[in-house]
Structures are given as C-alpha cells and as structure tokens.
Image (cartoon, rainbow, N blue to C red):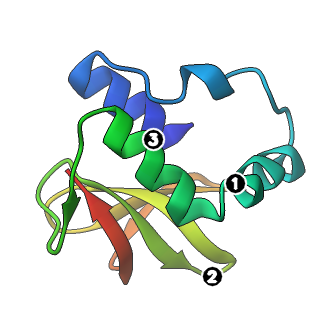
Amino acid sequence: MMLANWVRARTGRDPAAHLRGRYHTRLGWLRIANRAGGLTALVDDLARQAGLERMDQPRLGAVGIVAGPDGPTGAIFTGRRWVTKAPRSGLTAGPAVALAIWG
C-alpha cells in the first residue's frame, strides 16, 4: 500500500480503498496482483483511477514499478533515487531500472 498511501497523501484520492483490509500477507497481496494481470497492470489501473498518467521519465514524486532483487516492486522517485519498501529494513533508496512510471 506504500504507493497508494503516497498517492492519497498527494492527491486526496485513495485508488486502493477497495483493496484495504482484503489481504494480510505477502501471499494475499500477490494473489490480488496476479488476478489483475500482474503488479504493473494493477498499479496502472489504480494510478489511472487516481488521475495519474504514464510517463517515460520520472519526475520528483512519481510512482513506479522498478526491478528489485525479488522481482518487480513499487517505488517512489525522490528526484535522484527510487525508494522502495524492503522486507527487513523498512525503506531503502537507490538507483533502479524503472519498468513503468506514473505521475
């Protein structure tokens, strides 16, 4: 929900309101993403519902799907780095290959 929380804080619109409370584990989240056609397809739908558009290059505050060590993951662009949620350390920031970007 990191990306949805960010979008809600920035726009006042909660694109994932209908998903909140519907899962409690990583496996539950993966099932939701798989039913939507994958993480990128799910985030694309939610981003468009929030009024975001696809971008070729990230800008400060953009959300995206980046290639992570465990597969694609959601991220927020800080202007220099992508911030992602890390299972053990909370948040992590660094360079990343963006697979899809919305802003």
Of the two numbered discs 1 and 3 on the same chain, state the one appearing first in sequence. Answer: 1
Residue at figure coordinates x 76%, y 54% from the top left: 35
Q: Residues within 10 Å of mark 1 (few under 14, many from 20)?
A: some
Q: Secondary structure at mark 2?
A: loop
What amino acid does circle 1 point to? Ala
Q: To which residue does mark 2 refer?
A: 69
Q: To which residue does mark 3 refer?
A: 46
Residue at figure coordinates x 66%, y 28% from the top left: 19
What amino acid does circle 3 point to? Leu
**Residue 79 in picture, x, y percent from top left:** 13, 61
Q: Residues within 10 Å of mark 3 (few under 14, many from 20)?
A: some
Of the two numbered discs 2 and 1 on the same chain, state the one appearing first in sequence. Answer: 1
Quarter of the image where one finds residue 5? top left
In whole angstroms, how far apart are the C-alphas of marks 3 and 2?
24 Å
Residue at figure coordinates x 42%, y 22% from the top left: 14
Vertical side of 6 occupied by 26: above or below: below
Q: Quadrant of the N terminus?
A: top right
Front residue of this view, candidates 26 and 22 = 22
Front residue of this view, candidates 58 and 84 = 58
